[in-house]
Amino acid sequence: MLLAKCLTFTHPAGEPELPVILLLGPPGMGKTTALSRIAGSVVGPVSPVVHLPLHPSAGGSVLALVQQLAHDLVVLRKVRLPRTVFTLLVLKLDPALPDSEMEEQLQSVLRGNRVNPPINLGSLGDMLSCIPDVGPFLKFAVSTTQFALPLPVGTDFLHREARGWLTRRLPGGNIVDLARDLSQRGKDRTEFVSSVLCDALLEDLARAWTRRRYPRNCLVLLDDVDFPAGDALLRALTTAMTRRETQAPLVVVAASKTWPRAVAQWTRPGVVLPDANHPLTAGEATHGAWMRRRGRAEHRWWCPVLLPAVPADPMWGPYAIAAWELTRGYPSATGLLIELTGNVGDDDEFRGVLYKDNALYRLLPERLPYRDLLIAWSAVRNVDDAIDAPFTGLAPQLRDELADRLWLVGQSLEENESGIRPAPGSGGPQVTVIHDWLRRLLLHRLAADPARWDDVHQTMERFYRERGEADLAAAMSHRLARVTGETPDDPHLREVVRFLGERFEALDRHDGEDSRLREWIKLYERVTTAPNRLPLDRSLELTHGALATDPADPERLGRDTVIRALVVARWFWLDPLLDPTGRCAEEIARQFRGLVSYCKTGRSTLLGEADRYERRPER
């Protein structure tokens, strides 16, 4: 909706109404695919569409990118860009020559003669050939300008304006100084050259659309702009847009796997602030939404849009849904896991395929900031607690790096503590978390080192215990995480059950007219959000049975035995690797009904929970 509006939208002069749209997402979110689909979707009456894959390369520059863009517009789309081409040509001149020899060099190129010293025109030669009679005219323009003689009356207006425009745009009016500015390579001079190039491009587009009635604005798609030249090009374009009195007919859609530094007055995804202005989601990205939330002054052009996860298809089979739940719809990983597990027949086979392929190990991105610390962070439910934990002093830098690389997500505190997504529009406080898929891969890497797994979770258990009574459930979740399933009577599981049993007894009472067992359910939920390191090559039925059965109560007659079964069932159910098809929800419901026999208050509360899990809530 946003793009369709921008491509056809016109506005009275002076109103900046066309944004620079930034498609944002970490690697594998489908940015390149999205740009290709956009390019293919612009059908019907012909209007210029340019799709450039700006992959990082040594020596990349704004000049090279503008030349590539101009080449596609001039040679392939037949858009006349005389100012841009002339400016590019001036920038090819040898800055070491005196002014007069640089002028001769310029004339020789325009006449098509051999140039000494030679100039590598590259694609610029193709562009020059697309501008009718540019050689003879500019040869005459150079010679007459030196004597301040008037240009011939019959000369094409566009050609006359090319040199005249550049002369007026430069502070000293000497066009050859522009080539020297480029050769100086200082940041200020490089930015000046970039600004002149972008001014020329926007002016050419505005004049081209005035002369010819294109049915849509010019659409430029830029892939991989998150490297210095790509970022500098976007900065130069938005600066040039700000200087113009009228809107150029240009719509830019740029894809980036990092947060562009130039984007001010928007808040990076996952960064929780009171007045945060986070990027638009794909579903809310309309022209009106951008106008209401955009920045001010030179920042008003930016329109960051987060690429969405792949939605789950109701027609998928149970193991395709499990693959989606593992990745949370992360596009590249979802497709890969669905293909990998497409023919599995049961839960153990699903897990076995992932185990044999070693998918969760090999899919971890190679270049991650502070990798060792990040692996430890994965054990913690939210980034704020990870920063406060006694790991290392590099925590603030790591959070900024993750935010810049778009790996952070905002999550409701309710979901963070319960593991279940709240009802839409429920509101409430937010916390910052690592993207589900990245956290999954990091946890798998942490589990490959059992000693470190124990050390990290023991550290976090102490951390939460020291914070006081309110965080004891979080402490016990890290105790549950240390369960290995290798012994029938795991001491960590026994301690978790003892904690919840004591809290059940303490909270099984009325507070006014209501039972306090609702508080116990919240403790139970927070404990069972614990990660796990249970091996993928072990039978789920045997593992679940061994953990859920108390060796001291094989007949399952005691209250704590029911609580133990509840803990194991929900711990498994929250993890698609431990319960791919979600069947443990039925076990949770059954155990909640069994727990009713041991309570003095809140029977309706426990039965309500049983009903909820029988309906298979989204996990």
Image: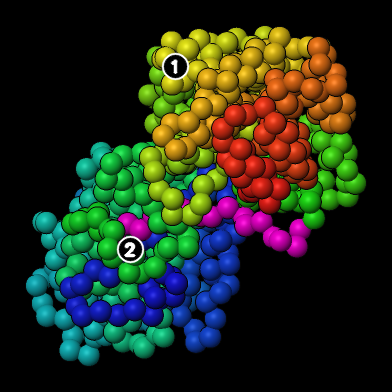
For image coordinates 71% across by 61% down, the residue present is 314
Going by the numbered disc 2, the residue's amino acid type is Trp
Disc on res. 290: 2
Residue 25 sits above or below residue 528 on the image: below
Q: How crowded is mark 1: few (under 14 residues within 10 Å), some or many (20 or more)?
A: few
The residue lying toward the viewer, choosing from 466 and 46, is 466
Mark 1 vs mark 2, CA separation in Å: 45 Å
Looking at the rendering, which quadrant does residue 375 occupy? top right
Q: In this view, does 216 lie to the left or right of 249?
A: right
Tell me if label 1 and label 2 are in contact, CB under 8 Å.
no
The image quadrant where one finds the C terminus is top right
For image coordinates 27% across by 45% down, the residue present is 275
Residue 579 place in picture, x, y as percent: 76, 38
The image quadrant where one finds the N terminus is bottom left
Magenta span includes 303: yes
Residue 128 place in picture, x, y as percent: 40, 71
For image coordinates 70% across by 20% down, the residue present is 560
How many marks do you count on the picture? 2
The magenta segment is 301-316
Magenta span includes 411: no
Most common SS among magenta residues: loop
* Badge 1 element: helix
* Badge 2 element: helix
Looking at the rendering, which quadrant does residue 609 occupy? top right
Mark 1 sits on what residue?
469
Residue 361 place in picture, x, y as percent: 71, 29
Residue 92 sits above or below residue 612 on the image: below
Going by the numbered disc 1, the residue's amino acid type is Glu
Q: How crowded is mark 2: few (under 14 residues within 10 Å), some or many (20 or more)?
A: many
**What color scheme is it?**
rainbow
